[in-house]
Amino acid sequence: MLYDSESFVVVHMLPDAVEKKSTQELNDTAPAVPQLARHGFEIVDKRSGKEVYLDGSWAEMFQEQILAWQRETPTQEEVEDALDRYAGLAQNPVVVH
């Protein structure tokens, strides 16, 4: 969990760590390991009860925002305003959390 307030929760989802296999193991008939293991961010808008999951280029843009926050130390209001813009993408109702 990266952020939790009265209005928002932000969770960084990381892919499972992939163990490298030896050359011998690669020649076996083991199931293929996904090649595009990616991270993502879930932003829950507690006010609307909806969430959005950012992955791919959206996750990369959000990661840049987080890095900027780490450098600049924004106020809570600035963070909430930025999250509110992403929450505009939220379409999925939160069912279980």
Image (tube, rainbow, N blue to C red):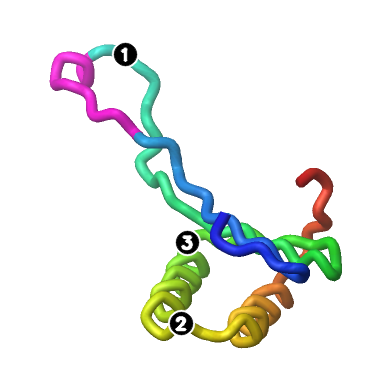
Instruction: Give, as a three-letter code, the residue at label 2.
Output: Thr
Let me know if residue 19 is in the magenta part: yes
**Other-residue count near label 2 (Cα within 10 Å), few / some / many at <14 / 14–19 / ≥20:** few
Q: Which residue is mark 2?
A: 73
Q: CA distance from mark 3 to mark 2?
A: 25 Å
Depth check, front residue: 19 or 28: 19
Q: Which mark is residue 29?
A: 1
Picture quarter with the N terminus: bottom right
Q: CA distance from mark 1 to mark 2?
A: 50 Å
Q: Which mark is residue 56?
A: 3
Asked whether the beta carbons under mark 1 and mark 3 sit within 8 Å of each other, the answer is no
Give left or right: position of 60 versus 55: left
Give the answer, above or below, for where 46 lies relative to 26. Answer: below
Q: Position of residue 66 (x, y in %)?
A: 46, 72
Please give the range of residues in magenta. Answer: 18-27
Depth check, front residue: 6 or 18: 6
Asked whether the beta carbons under mark 1 and mark 2 sit within 8 Å of each other, the answer is no
Question: Looking at the image, which residue is at 37% across and 26% down?
Answer: 32
Q: Earlier in the sequence, mark 3 or mark 2?
A: 3
Let me know if residue 84 is in the magenta part: no
Q: Position of residue 20 (x, y in %)?
A: 24, 29
> Which mark is in front, 1 or 2?
2
Secondary structure category for the residue under label 1: loop
